[in-house]
Amino acid sequence: MALLDVRDLTITLQTAHGPAAAVRDLSFSLEAGETLGIVGESGSGKSLTALALMGLLPESARATGSIRFEGEELLGRPERALDALRGDRMGMVFQEPMTALNPLHTVGAQVAEPLRLHRGLDRQQALREAIALLERVGIPDAAQRAAAYPHQFSGGQRQRIMIAAALACGPRLLLADEPTTALDVTVQKQILELMADLVTERGMALVLISHDLGVIAQNVRRMLVMYGGTAVETGPTAQVFAHPAHPYTLGLLGARPALSRRRGERLATLPGSVPELAELPAGCRFAGRCPFTAPLCESAPPPAVETAPGQFARCVRLDAVAAARQEAA
């Protein structure tokens, strides 16, 4: 039994033009100790997927399908049951720690809170555990700085504090939504190495959400590429980077900066922009922006096709994409 099993997840939001599927028919699974990266442009549904897993979708959103965690169905569970799960068996590192942390409470109290709620520790016991966690994630002088407030820490330190709070109760699954956004490369490397060490040390599963292909390439074993709320390609990370099958994945990888580029050479770009939710095509959501678009692409959503062992792509023109990739090589 998989630790996390998502099947046919569809998230519908209310827009000015009526209901629209921001995530459509998303399926994936994750075993204990596995790492999965979710990548895509802004608006592709990455963060919305993470919020659905944690049961934190906006009130106006409607989710259908199935999210099973340790065999338990999460969709439709009462809020009290989700409260018992969040911060205990499931933890989340949010994209912007300055808004996720409460400015009115000390960081020690915030890291200690899940220990008091889920483990029943008293205030002093929880604070001692919180200080140990802050030390574990690299906060200097943790015993003294536990009494400080979020604004008294740097961006990298606040992200470490968020990780400490998310890990306080030893979760089976950690969701990290753009955990290194706006951090310099040195701090980014430290944060990612810390999470990798904790995955190995605790045997927990990790879902890492990022728009940075370099972060995905170096930190997860499997990846899922999203566009317009749909998983257009999934597979082992090394395999997808070496042999991208979907035109969108090919475009993303082609737009990466490279040291081999000549001075002044323009980066490749994907034409157009992600359409509004209510204006997404009825068929392949990448149709129109895709250089391989054909009438068949616009008629119905393409099925997932296995292009290599464990690698799947949703495209009806896989042969044309493969031929173009080989010609370019």
Image (tube, rainbow, N blue to C red):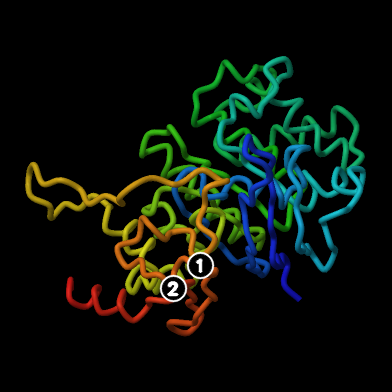
Q: On the rendered structure, is 82 left or right of 229?
A: right
- Distance, label 2 to label 1, CA atoms, is 30 Å
Crowding at mark 1 (Cα within 10 Å: few <14, some 14-19, many 20+): many
Going 66% across and 52% down the picture, which residue do you hit? 174
Q: Say which residue label 1 marks.
A: 222
Residue 315 found in image quarter: bottom left
Q: Are marks 2 and 1 in contact (CB under 8 Å)?
A: no
* On screen, residue 84 above or below 281: above
Amino acid, disc 2:
Leu
Q: Which quadrant is home to the C terminus?
A: bottom left
Amino acid, disc 1:
Arg
* On screen, residue 281 above or below 100: below
Of callouts 2 and 1, the N-terminal one: 1
Residue 68 x, y percent position in the rendering:
78, 64
Q: Secondary structure at mark 2?
A: helix
Q: Which quadrant is home to the N terminus?
A: bottom right
Residue 253 x, y percent position in the rendering:
31, 59
Which label is found at residue 289? none
* On screen, residue 160 above or below 12: above
Residue 204 found in image quarter: bottom right
Residue 113 x, y percent position in the rendering:
80, 32
Residue 130 x, y percent position in the rendering:
73, 34
Q: Secondary structure at mark 1?
A: strand
Q: On the rendered structure, is 161 left or right of 213?
A: right
Q: Nearer the viewer, residue 126 or 310?
A: 310
Q: Nearer the viewer, residue 119 or 299?
A: 299
Q: On the rendered structure, is 276 left or right of 87?
A: left
Q: On the rendered structure, is 19 left or right of 117?
A: left
Crowding at mark 2 (Cα within 10 Å: few <14, some 14-19, many 20+): some
Going 57% across and 29% down the picture, which residue do you hit? 158
Going 16% across and 52% down the picture, which residue do you hit? 259
Q: Say which residue label 2 marks.
A: 296
